[in-house]
Amino acid sequence: MVLSKTASESDVSIHSTFASRYVRNSLPRFQMPDNSIPKEAAYQIINDELMLDGNPRLNLASFVTTWMEPECDKLMMAAINKNYVDMDEYPVTTELQNRCVNMIARLFNAPLEDSEAAVGVGTVGSSEAIMLAGLAFKRKWQNRRKAEGKPYDKPNIVTGANVQVSYKLYH
């Protein structure tokens, strides 16, 4: 959840320079305007405000500095309206996910027979992927400890200070 703070009471209107051919008057910042505005103006106002943010390629403190081939961007945009979790409605997407899981398993030399399918999941984000990997690691550790007749109720993992931020959620 993102926590945000609203601006001061004196900052209650939006004054857009570049949308001015569509919008003659200021728009309220925290409520819907009384009259509609053209979609082009709404786009321009939001786009202008977003330009004030930092440049993602220069943000070395986040995960947004990655780059992909333009074809990857096109594929993502072509699939953006699909519900990734609804496997019955999107069986081809599910099949592609399963093929990717198998490719990655073989890339990392998973102990599989030639005709054996790998078991894995696809995720839509790195934090989700890392949390699932952490849970898989925990379950494997617990099962091994159970088989050895050792306690398995208090797992412990040691990480560096640079550990992925999602591991902080395990506290």
Image (tube, grey):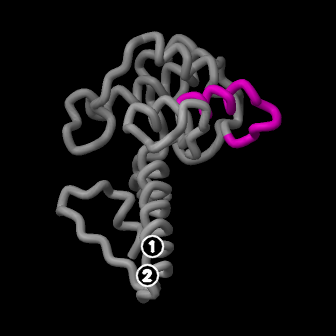
Q: Tell me residue 139's x, y (percent).
A: 50, 68
3D distance between C-alphas at marks 2 and 1:
6 Å
Is 90 on the left-hand or right-hand side of 136?
Answer: right
Q: Position of residue 45 (x, y in %)?
A: 49, 25
Q: Quadrant of the C terminus?
A: bottom left
Q: Could you tell me what secondary structure mostly forms the magenta stretch? A: helix
Magenta stretch: give its range: 85-100
Q: Residue at image x 35%, y 66%?
A: 168
Type of the residue with mark 2: Glu
Relative to 105, residue 77 above or below: above
Residue under label 1: 144
List x then y, in percent, for residue 12.
Answer: 48, 46
Label 1 is placed on what type of residue?
A: Arg
Label 1: element kind: helix
Tell me if 106 is positioned left or right of 79 in this view: left
Question: Callout 1: few (<14), some (14-19), or many (20+) C-alpha neighbours within 10 Å?
Answer: few
Q: Residue 121: image x %, image y %?
A: 57, 45
Name the residue that disc number 2 marks: 148
**Residue at x-position 75% and y-position 38%:** 87
Q: Is residue 70 visible?
A: yes
Quadrant of residue 150 within the rendered picture = bottom left
Question: Is any atom of residue 23 visible in this view?
Answer: no
Q: Are marks 2 and 1 in contact (CB under 8 Å)?
A: yes
Does dot 2 land on a helix, a strand or a loop? Answer: loop
Residue farthest to the right, as pictured: 88
Residue 101 drawn above or below residue 80: below
Residue 126 quadrant: top left
Query: Residue shown at 38%/14% (left/top)?
Result: 69
